[in-house]
Image (cartoon, coloured by chain):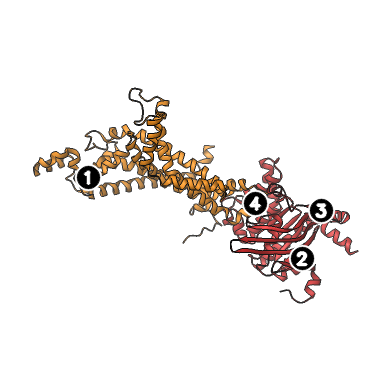
Chain colours: A red, B orange
Amino acid sequence: MDKVRECLKSGILCMLAEVVGMDVLTVKNLSVSFFRTEGEIEALKNVSFTLREGEILAVMGKTGCGKSVLCKSILKLLPDIAKIKTGHIYIRGEEITGYSEKQMQGLRGRFFSMVFQNPMTALNPCMSVGEQIGEMVRLRRPEFSGRERKKRVAELMELVGLDHAGERARQYPFQLSGGMAQRCVIAIALAAEPAVLFADEATTALDATVQAQILELLLKLRERTGMSIVLVTHNPGVAARTADRVALMRDGELYRIGDVEEIFDESTPN
Amino acid sequence: MWRKFLTNRHLIKMVNNIGKFLISVLVLSVLVFTLSRLAPGDPLYAYYGERVEKMSVEEQDQARERLGLQAPLFTQYVRWLQRAVHGDFGISYQYKTDVKEVIAAGIVNTLLLGGLGFVLIFALALFLGLFCAWREDRLADRVVCRIGTVTSCIPEFWLSLLLLLIFSVWLDWLPSSGAYAAGGGGSLPDRAAHLVLPLSVVVLGHLWYYAFQIRNRLLEEVRADYVLLARMKGLSGRRVLYRHCLRGALPSYLSMMAIALPHILGGTYVVETVFSYPGIGKLAYESARYQDYNLLMVVSLLTGTLVILCNLTARLVNERIDPRMGVRSVSAGGEVRRL
């Protein structure tokens, strides 16, 4: 009974995946190090977890424990000095650990997207918001005409709760508030209908009210699109309210993963 | 279409900019006029040469009177301005003919050399900067950086002589002096052949400085947060560089190039001398050296006007590229931080 309700909640995609029994993302024994002149810094040590279709996984831990590195190493957006030492990354059963930059470009945005911590600096200050969302739409749907693309941008902006989309699209990031800018970043992240969304401290830079709005938006989008979300946060409240499961990290290790109730019933996480 | 473009707002902006331009030129003329007359030296020397020393004081005063140099500074300026507005810039003391004639002989050559050099430097620097930023810290970038640093350290006169020696003395491929062959009268291939060497020196002397600037500006942009989002979209590194980073780096590059114009034009002087290229670089220097006031005014105003025009264009273009630059034109909702 529980299972049926969950499937209904997460939409048809989730149900299909349940039938096939596939995890959308699997990370096995991932170790990442930064090689600096002073020596090697181990950022991730033997991290393993799976992300199920349509679930929200909160990754928690102190600053500097490797949460962001985890997301970025899956998307391969780490700087050159960082290397994946060991481990495997699978998406829907296919291994992508050895993918070239070119292959990764095909996956980024389409299979997984990312929302960053500071929306004000994440957007290009010299491009209008509509242009930046449109760029993602163009990558995904190159066959669209200019008008179709504009229509799609407006749709996306409405989806993330930006009103007066036509007018807003012409605005530049410095003309937006933090909350609006983050909605734009989310619109970009969603433009190609990704299967996994990494929200890397997506609400940390925002005030409590806007934070709640953005989280609600993420939940709503999950219902509509059935995507999985990796919610990186250091705020237990955020995790408890939104996540299905919680992973705890400390010093580059993922030492505990489980359902929300399970984790929060125990002692408070570090 | 024109009607749509020429709305009231645009008209106001245009009038505003033209007004600013005129005021700048006027202020510049006042400054050059005053400063040139404050500088030590006697313009009579330019006119009469050594003969001045044999003239009596009365004769000197009469000569000054004739040249209009006895009146108070302000009156002199007003007189000059009145004539200038009608297109009469007076005579050159040194050459004793109309200033316009003196300049007309060389201005086309200098503009050709300086202008072509400027365009080439601008385009090549952009290309090199982009290339180096794209291959940052890899072999190609390092090699280009080293070569660039070395070439930018070579003095222009030495490089000119070296190129002359190689290409016109030893190989005899290119002419060594002048702007066109003596009898030929300046056909296009002939002029081009005469331009190659001076142009190479002008370009090589400046190129790396600007290429290095744009490279570093681009690398600053490459390290910005928004690049991560752009790459997250699935854009390739090259597309991110062209479409995102270049856009951020371009405004400062354009401003820099606008200021660089007189520098590059002025830099043609050494080159003009070595290659005996008939331009106005030499005139500019000599007019200041010998108090040839009228000539100095026109040469300074010409370069000054060019600089002001370039700055104006750069600012207008920059506002299109980066709307944060147009502090006053930003409509409601924009927060532009100022000091």
**Which label sits in the foreground, 1 or 2?**
2
Mark 3 lies on residue? A93
The picture places residue B78, in percent across and down from the top left corner, at 25, 45
- From the viewer's perspective, tell me whether residue B82 is left or right of residue A189: left
**Which label sits in the foreground, 3 or 4?**
3
Q: Quadrant of residue B294?
A: top left
Mark 1 lies on residue? B76
Residue neighbourhood size for the residue with mark 2, other residues' Cα within 10 Å, grouped as few (<14), some (14–19), many (≥20): some
Mark 2 lies on residue? A243
> Cα distance, mark 3 to mark 1?
88 Å
> Cα distance, mark 2 to mark 4?
27 Å
Asked if badges 3 and 4 are on one and the same chain, I answer no
- From the viewer's perspective, tell me whether residue B292 is left or right of residue A69: left
Q: Amino acid at mark 4?
A: Arg
Labels 2 & 4 near each other (Cβ < 8 A) = no
Residue neighbourhood size for the residue with mark 3, other residues' Cα within 10 Å, grouped as few (<14), some (14–19), many (≥20): few
Name which residue lies at 68% across and 70% down. Answer: A62
Mark 4 lies on residue? B231
Q: Is label 4 in a helix, a strand or a loop?
A: helix
Q: Earlier in the sequence, mark 2 or mark 3?
A: 3
Residue neighbourhood size for the residue with mark 1, other residues' Cα within 10 Å, grouped as few (<14), some (14–19), many (≥20): some
- The answer to whether one can see residue B209 in this image is no
Asked if badges 3 and 1 are on one and the same chain, I answer no
Q: Is label 1 in a helix, a strand or a loop?
A: helix
Of A40 and B104, nearer the camera is A40
> Cα distance, mark 1 to mark 2?
83 Å
Q: Amino acid at mark 3?
A: Gly
